Amino acid sequence: MSILQSAFSWLGDKLNISTRDESFWRWYGGSDNWSGKSVTQQSALQLSAVWACVRLLAETIATLPLNLYAIDRNGKSSVAYADALYRILHDVPNGEMTAVDFWESILAAILLWGNGYARKDIVGGVLIGLTPLRPELMAVVRDQVTGAILYRYSDPRGRVDYTEDQIFHVKGFSLDGLVGLSPIAFGRNSMGAAMAIEEAAAGTFSRGMRPGGVLQMEQVLKPDQRKQVEDNLIGKFSGAVNSGKVMLLEAGMKYQQVTMNPEDAQMLQSRAFSVEELCRWYRVPPFMIGYTEKTTSWGTGLEQQNIGFLTYSLRPYLKRIEQQISRSLIAPKMRATRFAEYNLEGLLRADSAGRAALYASAAQNGWMTRNEIRAKENQPASDEANADALTVQSNLLPLDKLGLSAAAATPPEAVKP
């Protein structure tokens, strides 16, 4: 660790602040981006593209069923309904949240701050719940003596140091494997520029779509005359509510336009480009957040688009959560027989014609039974005798064998003694 890093770490400990917080670096170095706009998690969410990307990823993952599976001696896996961890992951993580609420908050923290934290609620050595912690109040440090990872949580009530065994920590994209990197912190230039564009557009509309200008006078005005011009001319004829009024100029006063109009400034093109730019930070195709100016190259069918979204946008987050559950919430001796996995069936469902073709192939080629197909469609199991049997389609039979039973249609030489 460099002398500068050590000094900042010491300063953070003394002042009870986190040097990972971008507000600290704004104080230390002034504006944190080229546009001069203050970019924080809250201000970034005011951009519609950031809001839409975060909501799309967080809500989609939070509403996917997360199951805990048990592996028996034969290597078969089944949902571990009786395991207490299943209820925590799938239904009720704590007394105040549903599973959707909890995972939505964890994903939002990862997407905004780069890290999602939850305190393990343990009673009598048994995990009974998970309580999310605010990521902006958490600092991850290493003990200078033991080298152990400590989670330093500071809130108005004081500072608490948690051990690694007490915190469930899901990281975003990371360079050191210790903490994730915040998309807001690293994308502040793109987001700051988008904010500046939105502010310029809002200012243009607030002026009634009229460009700014200057009033030229042939003489120097006295302070009281200047105030009179500002109150009677500038104040009464600026703003959207005064758009269309006719200004009377006298005593040689002239008006001269000095700013470009929105078309000259390519404001509309800039706003459209900012949507694509912000989508890159979250690896979300623009068409999925309502930007339809350009067509997608992810295929034409809904299934193909969902597969592309799952593969490139969702999969990294899903695998991080699944593996962190195995590492942090499942006891080492149970990891060989327990694992967590998202059920992606809902995302991979095609249209009615596509599902019908898939099920027909499954039934005719013997890799799904009729009752398994009915279960996929949330239909009750059939009581027919062969509903749980694997079947295959018979073809290329001689014409004189059509209509016969399978035993009668089998040639004698094909029957084994």
Image (cartoon, rainbow, N blue to C red):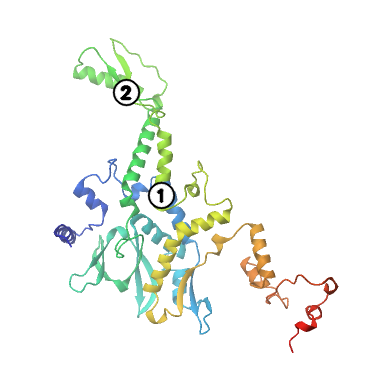
- In the rendered image, which quarter is residue 228 located in? top left
**SS of the residue under disc 1:** helix
Name the residue: 50% across, 47% down.
287
Residue type marked 2: Val
Relative to 339, is 284 above or below? above
Name the residue: 39% across, 82% down.
333
Relative to 295, is 76 above or below? below
Name the residue: 43% across, 35% down.
268
Residue 91 appearing in the image: no
- In the rendered image, which quarter is residue 224 located in? top left
Q: Position of residue 242 (x, y in %)?
A: 39, 24
Relative to 336, is 1 above or below? above
Judged from this view, the residue extending furthest toward the bottom is: 417
Judge from the rendering whether residue 177 lies leftward or rightward of residue 394; answer left or right: left
Q: Position of residue 249 (x, y in %)?
A: 32, 13
What quarter of the picture does the C terminus occupy?
bottom right
Relative to 340, is 268 above or below? above
